[in-house]
Amino acid sequence: MKHAALNLLILILVILGITMQFFVLTGQPSAPVPAEKMRQLAAKLESEELYPQAIAIYREYLAHPALNAELRANILYRIGTIYLEKTQEYQNALATFIQISDLYPETKIAIEADKKKVPCYEQLKRGFDAQKKLKQLTDLHPDETGTGPIVATIGDRKIYLETVEREIAQLPEVYRTQFQTPQQKLEFLKSKLFNDLLYDMALRKDYQNNPDVRKQMQEFEKNLLATRVYTEEVRNAISVSPSDVELYYKANPQEFTTPASAQIAHIQLKTLEEAQALRQEIEQGLAFEEAAKTRSLDARTKDQGGVLGRIYASNDTLPGIGPDEKTVAALMALEAREISPPVEHQGRYHLFKILEKSAAHLPPLQEIQAQVEQRVRRMKEEEKRMELTQRLLEAEHVKIYEQALFAHTVNEATATSTP
């Protein structure tokens, strides 16, 4: 009996061995591949840019029954993103994101899947669906409130005449005056609509999440917030009293004094001899204006009797000719109606006439009150800014390494200038 039982056990073991060998030879797996191994393989294929193969393995991974809803939704989101961003299969991408919304709406990734539908619609040229989905997801375009007639609609968003007129009123005056007639307002409305539609399209294309755009937006946000604090801490903290204005005016008259000036005309000639001879003719009675029209080489001014413009004691420029400090000083020393000796400038000779002169003049404070107040405000603002800068540097323990900055700058300049 013992021998019979032993023989039966041996027979069973032999059959099991043959069966195992059969599975090995026929390629049948001895056990299912663990789910995590499948996920890792799919991720590796994706990293190798083998996107169709990665999607196939991700879908095999989804067949494992033990996966929870959150994990399934995340894997589907990964598949949809590959379709959208890597293989540009927008229909498959949209279908995958819809699958997440319908089958796993309670998962955390479902909201992101909804957002991904927008660029899918946009790429499939379904702009209306994209706009509709975007409006469901965001409130970036709340219904505008206003009174009066509706002048345009974008989908179900209304734009009122009052809104258009309010935006025009907020423009700087130089631009505001360009949009007063009905036709001009229509052009403004079209421009506004075009800008809004471009903005909507940018959102549908998900440009707001583009790294370069995000960086620019962050920089803009930083500047906007910094400007807000600057306005509060510096500009709004300044007060300018009438006594401040009067004191500054009396202490700094040179800033508001109109310098001495002279209106001049000229005759341009080729040689010194011609200039000397013509000056003698003018002294003998020839009208300077007539001589300029008939004898001057300067075609720009001869028909106007040689009139050039105004020179100032504080400026070394001859209008229409160029910088010439020595000549300007000599002309300012002449009397009204006086003719200058010949003056050489860049190979040509000039006779100048002083048409009229104005002495230096300090306007009364009442005439330039606003200008003086602006100067005082600017001065106080700069003082306040420097004070705030120093306070912040000390409070935040900021260290500036000037030597490193200067040394690096000098080295760069030396390297640039080296041939």
Image (spheres, grey):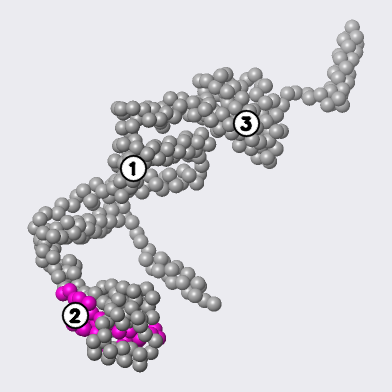
Task: Please state, as top left, top right, bottom left or bottom right, where the C terminus lies in the image.
Answer: bottom right
Query: What are the residue bounds of the magenta stretch?
Result: 330-359
Q: Which sits earlier in the primary sequence, circle 3 or circle 1? A: 3
**Residue 243 lies in what quarter of the image?**
bottom left
Q: Is residue 295 left or right of residue 210?
A: left
- Rendered image quadrant of residue 361: bottom left
What whole-number distance in Å separates the C-alpha atoms at marks 3 and 1? 43 Å
Disc 2: which residue? 336
Indicate which disc residue 90 carries.
Answer: 3
Sort mark 3 into few (<14), some (14-19) or many (20+) by Cα contacts within 10 Å. many
Which is closer to the viewer, label 3 or label 2? Answer: 2
Q: Earlier in the sequence, mark 1 or mark 2?
A: 1
Looking at the rendered structure, the secondary structure element under dot 2 is loop
Query: Disc 3 marks which amino acid?
Result: Tyr
Q: Relative to the observer, which residue lies in front, 22 or 373?
A: 373
Where in the figure is residue 289, as x and y percent of width and height?
Answer: 28, 79
